[in-house]
Amino acid sequence: MATSDVIVVGAGLAGLAAARAIAASKRTVTVLEARSRVGGRTENATFSDGQWIEVGGQWIGPTQDRMYGLVEELGLGTFPLFNEGKLLLQLLGKRGTMGSQKGAIPKLGPFALVDLAQGLAKFNRLAASVPLERPWETPNAAFLDGQTFRTWIDRTLKTQAGRAYFQIFCEAVFSADPADTSLLHTLFYSKSGTDMETLMAVDGGAQQDRIEGGSVQVSERLAQQLGAAVHLGSPVRTIRQDADGVTVITRDGTEHRAAQVIVTLPPTLAGRLEYDPPLPSWRDQLTQRLPAGSVMKLYLVYETPFWRAEGLNGQVGSDEGPVKVTFDNTPPGYDRGVMMGFMEGNDGREWARRTPEERKEAFVTCLVRYFGEQARHPVEYLERDWMAEEFSRGCYGAHFTPGVWTAYGPALREPVGRIHWAGAECSPIWNGYMEGAVRSGEATAAEVLAALG
């Protein structure tokens, strides 16, 4: 039986950040990763000509200090997402453009603009009242957590355009429908990433920068530092704990022994492991109520980024799908044009049942509606269905359904004996993002090192 001071389950950003912090404190650590690669929900793929592209998480932005720090420390660089020109906004069958700068106001009718402004003001005021470390202590928490985001939208927004704007926000940020997530969680998540405007923006926002060579390189370089401590192809099946330590058993029967264990899997996957003794009911009930978002990430490649000649930056927000959000994801120096889009929420669930060819045609149809006939003839298509990934089962992260924060909130990060929890979903700051994963991994490593004495 292999032994170490700490076992980390999962070699995504949270797990590797935790493992590095433990190793830096001269403690021994073992990282068990189910996949044949590191990176978790970050991953690279290549087009037919060898050009790399990200099929998982990719963006970092202002105030994400730990990610920028790691990028610099690991010898990587960043470049801005293409954001020159106007973005398209399609609401209620009407197509228009708006500025791409942070804080730009969509071109809507006067009643819709007033309605949207009052809705945003109310949302931001409520979000400001959420204590990030303890959302369940928000004023009127039970009332806020007892309703869906959809309920609040329908009650607060009076115009179709105003409601559509908030619908697009929810699908783009959570990969979920507003009926899926509690209002309290939506408020928490928005404040966790600064505010709704920051979550939606490019320049000065969460989509500002990409990492040269792909975001997965952060995980790959962290894993290189850890060397033989990282075990790939080692999916964990069982975690047993006793008075003296923990035994972690992989699917092939290999046993690893340590004093403490950190589980960094998405909550719904963490709940599927076998625990001996069983987890307390409040922890298990929590994981039953934290589903992953429903999303597929799609790429169409064109001979040139033709939309730029029309003064457009490739970004779309639409209330008509199945691809409602797009970005120009063309890497610097690449001659061809790369258009990226998402099928999210209810669209993701529906189109996951279709074939890749049907999804490609649907994406093309959407782009023709947005950008015209030049979008009719792509030269390549690539997709990643994160719902079908065995060791993710959805992206971008988990969303809290109604009643979860107030009934189970403290169980999210509270250790169960020698079992500790980390991951993007566990961070009060930039929850659900790569930044949150790194912060959570480092914070949990400090907790474990304290437990080790």
Image (cartoon, helix red, strand yellow):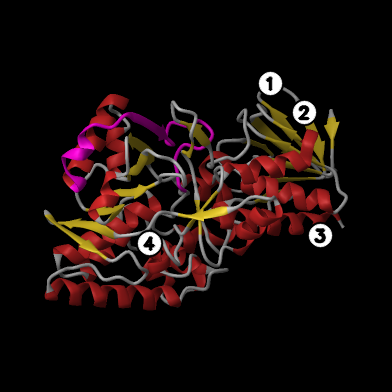
**CA separation, marks 4 and 3?**
38 Å
**CA separation, marks 4 and 2?**
45 Å
| 16 to the left or right of 317 | right
Residue 199 drawn above or below residue 416: below
Mark identifier at residue 200: 4
* Neighbourhood count class around disc 3 (C-alpha, 10 Å): few under 14, some 14–19, many 20 upward: few
**The N terminus lies in quadrant:** top right
Q: Which residues are magenta?
A: 370-396
Q: Residue furthest top?
A: 252
Please name the amino acid that badge 2 sits on: Glu
- Tell me, yes or no, whether the two marked residues, 4 and 2, touch with CB atoms within 8 Å: no
The residue labelled by disc 1 is 252
The residue labelled by disc 2 is 255
Please name the amino acid that badge 3 sits on: Ala
Q: Is residue 12 magenta?
A: no
The residue labelled by disc 3 is 450
**CA separation, marks 3 and 1?**
32 Å
Sequence-first disc among 3 and 1: 1
| 402 to the left or right of 92 | right
Sequence-first disc among 4 and 3: 4
- Tell me, yes or no, whether the two marked residues, 4 and 3, touch with CB atoms within 8 Å: no
Mark identifier at residue 368: none
Sequence-first disc among 1 and 4: 4
